[in-house]
Image: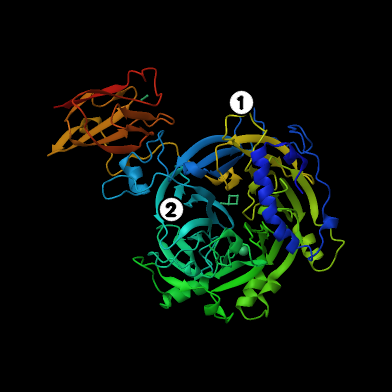
C-alpha cells in the first residue's frame, strides 16, 4: 500500500501515483499465489528524524574545512554530465560535461571538446541534448582502480568515458544498430586470461527494439534489440549480440565470465499493454568467452553500414546449453534493476511490476552452460516478496540487500541468505530486516563501495524521483531528492535530504583514496600548446587566421590582435600558469566564445570574425587582483 505520506500530496502527483499503482496491481495479483510475504512485512518504521548524533556516529555533517571520505559519481540526467559529489556530505564538487555543451568550461565550443562530442560536416555539433542514466567505473581485483568511469546517453545511444585523473570526458562512442541504450556495466576481469584482473570491456544494453537495418520497416513484430560490448581502452564497439526481447539494466560477474541484463519486454511488444502481457520476463545471461570465440570463428553477420560483428543470441539459435551464447532465466513481470552481490555469488533482479526480488545463483548458471543442470530456472534460489515496485538494490557486505520500493516509497533491507532459506521452504526464515520511508518514490540506490568486493556498509544514498513537500516550492518543476542514510546499524537511519537537478538516476560511491586526481596539466599533453609567450602571434593563410596566445595572471600574451571581417579565426590559448587552481577564462563579446584553460592546459576555438570593430576579450575566471584588467582586444578590420 501507499504510505501515509502519499495521501497529502497535490492532485497531479497523487494521480501519477495512482496510475502507476493501477498498472502494478496486475503484477501484484499474479504473485499472490507465490510464497506469502505476510510474515515478512513488518509495519513501516516511522520516518526517522535527521539525527547527526545517533548511535553509530555516522554523519553527513562536516565542519568547515573538513574533507569528505568518499567520492560519488552521479549521472546528471538531462544536462548530459557526470556530477562529482563528496560523500557523506552530498556536496556537489564538479560537473563533468559529456554529451551536452557547458558554458563554464566551454565544452562543445572548444575544438578539442567538439572533437570528442562529434560534429556534422559543417562543423556544428552533431547533438546538443543528452539523457544520462548510468555511471560505473573501471575495476581491478573486484574494486575500483581509479582509471575510468563511463556514462550512457539514452537518447542517442552514446557511451562517454571519463578519465579519473583529470575528471574529464575524453571519448564518446555511438553504438550502431541500437536505440535507447540504457544499462551499462564494465567487466571486472577477463573470462579466460587470469592475468587480466581488471576492466577491458564495457557492456551496453539496448532497450528499444528497432528494425534491423532501420530503414522504414513498419512491422513492429520485427523490431530487435542488441547487447553491445565496447572496448574499455579504444572505446570501439567490439561485438554485439542479437537477442530476443530487450535489455534494461546490466550487471557483470566478478569472475568475468557472465554479463546479464534484465528484460521487461520479452513480449517484444510495441505498446505498454503488450510489454506487460506475459507473467514472466527474463534476465538474459551472456557467456562472454563463447561469444568472443564465435566472433573469432566468423560466426556473425553485420547490419547496414556498421562493420561490428553481430552474433546470434536468440532462443532459437541457443538450444544446446553446451554451445549456447545466451541463457534466459525467467523472472516475474517487467523486472528493472539487476545487481551483483559483493560476495560474488548472486545477481538480484528487482521485480518492478512484481513485488518480488529474484536471486539467481551464478555458479548454477555456469553449470547450465556446462550441461550439468537440466532446468535453467533452477538457478533461481529465491524469489520473495519485498514490497511494491522494487527497482534497484544495494549491498552492505554483511549479507543484506537494500532495495528501493518505488510505489511504497520505502527502502527495504532484507537478508539474502534468509530469503534463500525461506524460498527453500523454511517459512520461519525472516528475511525482511527493516523498512525505511523515503521521500518519495525512490529509483536508484547505492551504498558506499556497494558494487565492489569491498562493500563497507556505511552510507546509503537513494535517488527519490519526487520531492513533493521536502523543499521550498519553486514553481512547477520540483527538485529531485537525493537522501543519505546511515546503513551501518541493524536499522537504517535517514541522515539528510539534498535537492538535485533532474533527472539523475544512477551513481556510485567509493573511498577517496581510490582515485589520484591531478590538478595541473602537462604542457606536452597538448600537441598545439603555445609553450613560450614569444611564440604568440597571428598567422594568416588566405581567409584562415591562427591566433596563438598564452595566459599568465594577470595578462594574455597579446595585448591586441587584428583580423579581418569574415576571417575564419582559430584562437589557441595555453595557460602557462602552473599553480593549482589558477584557471583563466577567455570570452569574446558577440562571437559566442567563452571557455576556460586550467593550469597547463591548451584549448582552441574556431569562429568567424564578425562586424568590423573593437571587441574586448576578457578573462571570465577570477584569477588575480587584476582579473578585471586581464583583457586583450580583438580588432576586426573591414
Ligand atoms: S533507470 Cu533511472 S530509476 Cu534509467 Cu537506472 Cu531505474
Ligand atoms: Cu585570468 Cu581572471
Ligand atoms: Ca513484460
User: How far apart, in angstroms, are the residues tagged by discs 1 and 2?
Assistant: 41 Å
* Image quarter where ligand 2 lies: top left
Q: Which residue is mark 2?
A: 156
In the structure shown, which secondary structural element does the residue marked by tag 1 occupy? loop
Residue located 83% across and 68% down the image? 425
Q: Earlier in the sequence, mark 1 or mark 2?
A: 1
Using residue 121 as the reference point, say whether residue 7 is left or right of it. Answer: right
Colour pattern of the rendering: rainbow
- Circle 1 is placed at which residue position? 64
Above or below: residue 400 compared with residue 47: below
Q: Is residue 538 visible?
A: yes
Among all residues in the image, which is located at the extreme right? 428
Quarter of the figure with residue 235: bottom left
Residue nearer the viewer, 437 or 362: 437
- Would the CB of label 2 be found within 8 Å of ligand 1? no
Q: Look at 53% across and 40% down and name the residue there.
A: 84
Other residues around mark 2 within 10 Å, as few (<14) / some (14–19) / many (≥20): some
Residue lying furthest left in this view? 542
Q: Position of residue 440 (x, y in %)?
A: 68, 41
Above or below, 579 relative to 273: above
Assess mark 1: CB under 8 A from ligand 2?
A: no
Name the one closer to the observer, 190 or 628.
Answer: 628
Q: Position of residue 43 (x, y in %)?
A: 83, 47
Please tell me how many numbered marks the rendered image carries.
2
Instruction: Locate the C terminus and report the quarter of the image it occupies.
Output: top left
Q: Residue at x 57, y 41 (%)?
A: 71
Q: Which residue corresponds to the image point at 79% horizontal and 46% vertical from the top-left? A: 490
The answer to whether one can see residue 525 in this image is no
The secondary structure type at the circle numbered 2 is loop
Local crowd at mark 1 within 10 Å, few (<14), some, or many (≥20)? few
Label 1 or label 2, whichever lies nearer to me, is: 2
Amino acid at each position: 500500500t501507499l504510505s501515509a505520506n502519499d495521501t497529502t500530496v497535490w492532485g497531479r502527483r497523487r494521480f501519477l501515483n495512482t496510475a502507476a499503482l493501477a498498472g502494478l496491481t496486475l503484477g501484484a495479483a499474479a504473485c499472490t499465489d507465490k510464497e506469502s510475504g505476510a510474515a515478512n512485512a513488518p509495519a513501516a518504521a516511522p520516518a526517522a528524524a535527521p539525527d547527526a548524533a545517533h548511535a553509530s556516529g555516522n554523519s553527513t555533517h562536516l565542519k568547515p574545512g573538513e574533507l569528505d571520505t568518499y567520492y560519488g559519481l552521479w549521472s546528471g540526467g538531462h544536462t548530459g554530465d557526470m556530477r562529482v559529489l563528496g560523500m557523506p556530505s552530498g556536496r556537489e564538487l564538479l560537473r563533468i560535461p559529456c554529451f551536452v555543451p557547458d558554458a563554464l568550461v566551454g565544452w562543445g565550443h572548444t575544438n578539442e571538446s567538439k572533437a570528442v562530442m562529434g560534429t556534422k560536416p559543417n562543423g556544428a555539433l552533431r547533438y546538443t541534448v543528452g539523457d544520462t542514466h548510468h555511471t560505473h567505473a573501471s575495476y581491478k581485483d573486484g574494486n575500483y582502480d581509479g582509471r575510468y568511469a563511463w556514462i550512457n546517453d539514452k537518447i542517442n545511444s552514446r557511451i562517454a568515458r571519463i578519465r579519473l585523473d583529470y575528471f574529464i570526458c575524453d571519448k564518446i562512442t555511438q553504438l550502431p544498430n541500437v536505440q535507447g541504450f540504457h544499462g551499462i556495466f564494465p567487466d571486472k576481469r577477463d573470462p579466460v586470461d587470469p592475468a587480466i584482473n581488471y576492466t577491458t570491456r564495457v557492456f551496453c544494453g539496448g532497450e528499444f527494439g528497432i528494425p534491423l537495418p532501420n530503414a522504414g520497416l513498419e512491422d513492429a513484430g520485427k523490431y530487435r534489440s542488441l547487447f553491445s560490448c565496447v572496448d574499455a581502452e579504444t572505446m570501439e564497439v567490439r561485438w554485439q549480440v542479437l537477442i530476443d526481447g530487450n535489455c534494461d539494466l546490466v550487471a557483470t560477474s566478478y569472475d568475468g565470465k557472465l554479463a546479464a541484463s534484465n528484460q521487461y519486454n520479452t513480449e517484444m511488444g510495441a505498446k505498454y499493454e503488450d510489454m506487460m502481457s506475459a507473467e514472466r520476463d527474463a534476465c538474459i545471461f551472456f557467456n562472454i568467452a563463447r561469444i568472443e570465440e564465435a566472433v573469432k570463428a566468423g560466426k556473425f553477420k553485420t547490419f547496414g553500414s556498421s562493420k561490428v560483428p553481430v552474433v546470434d543470441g536468440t532462443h532459437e539459435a541457443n538450444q544446446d546449453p553446451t554451445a549456447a551464447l545466451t541463457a534466459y532465466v525467467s523472472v516475474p513481470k517487467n523486472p528493472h534493476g539487476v545487481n551483483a552481490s559483493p560476495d560474488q555469488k548472486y545477481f538480484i533482479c528487482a521485480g518492478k511490476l512484481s513485488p518480488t526480488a529474484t536471486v539467481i545463483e551464478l555458479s548454477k548458471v555456469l553449470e547450465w552452460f556446462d550441461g550439468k543442470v537440466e532446468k535453467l530456472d533452477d538457478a533461481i534460489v529465491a524469489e520473495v516478496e519485498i514490497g511494491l515496485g522494487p527497482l534497484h538494490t544495494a549491498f552492505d557486505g554483511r549479507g543484506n540487500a537494500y532495495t528501493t520500493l518505488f510505489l511504497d516509497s520505502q527502502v527495504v533491507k532484507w537478508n539474502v541468505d534468509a530469503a534463500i532459506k525461506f524460498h527453500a521452504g523454511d517459512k520461519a526464515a525472516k528475511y525482511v530486516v527493516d523498512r525505511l520511508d523515503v521521500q518519495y518514490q525512490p529509483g536508484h540506490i547505492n551504498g558506499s563501495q556497494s558494487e565492489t568486493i569491498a562493500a563497507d556498509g556505511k552510507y546509503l544514498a537513494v535517488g527519490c524521483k519526487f520531492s513533493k513537500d521536502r523543499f521550498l516550492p519553486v514553481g512547477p518543476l520540483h527538485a529531485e531528492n537525493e537522501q543519505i542514510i546511515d546503513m551501518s546499524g541493524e536499522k537504517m537511519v535517514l541522515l539528510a535530504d539534498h535537492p538535485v537537478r533532474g533527472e539523475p538516476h544512477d551513481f556510485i560511491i567509493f573511498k577517496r583514496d581510490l582515485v589520484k586526481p591531478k590538478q595541473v596539466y602537462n604542457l606536452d599533453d597538448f600537441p598545439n600548446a603555445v609553450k613560450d609567450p614569444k611564440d604568440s602571434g597571428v598567422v594568416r593563410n588566405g581567409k584562415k587566421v591562427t591566433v596563438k596566445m598564452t595566459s599568465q595572471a594577470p595578462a594574455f600574451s597579446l595585448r591586441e590582435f587584428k583580423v579581418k571581417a569574415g576571417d575564419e579565426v582559430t584562437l589557441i590559448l595555453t595557460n602557462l600558469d602552473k599553480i593549482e587552481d589558477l584557471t583563466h577564462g577567455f570570452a569574446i563579446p558577440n562571437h559566442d566564445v567563452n571557455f576556460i584553460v586550467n593550469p597547463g592546459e591548451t584549448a582552441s576555438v574556431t569562429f568567424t570574425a564578425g562586424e568590423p570593430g573593437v571587441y574586448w576579450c576578457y578573462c571570465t575566471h577570477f584569477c588575480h587582483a587584476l582579473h578585471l584588467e586581464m583583457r586583450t582586444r580583438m580588432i576586426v578590420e573591414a
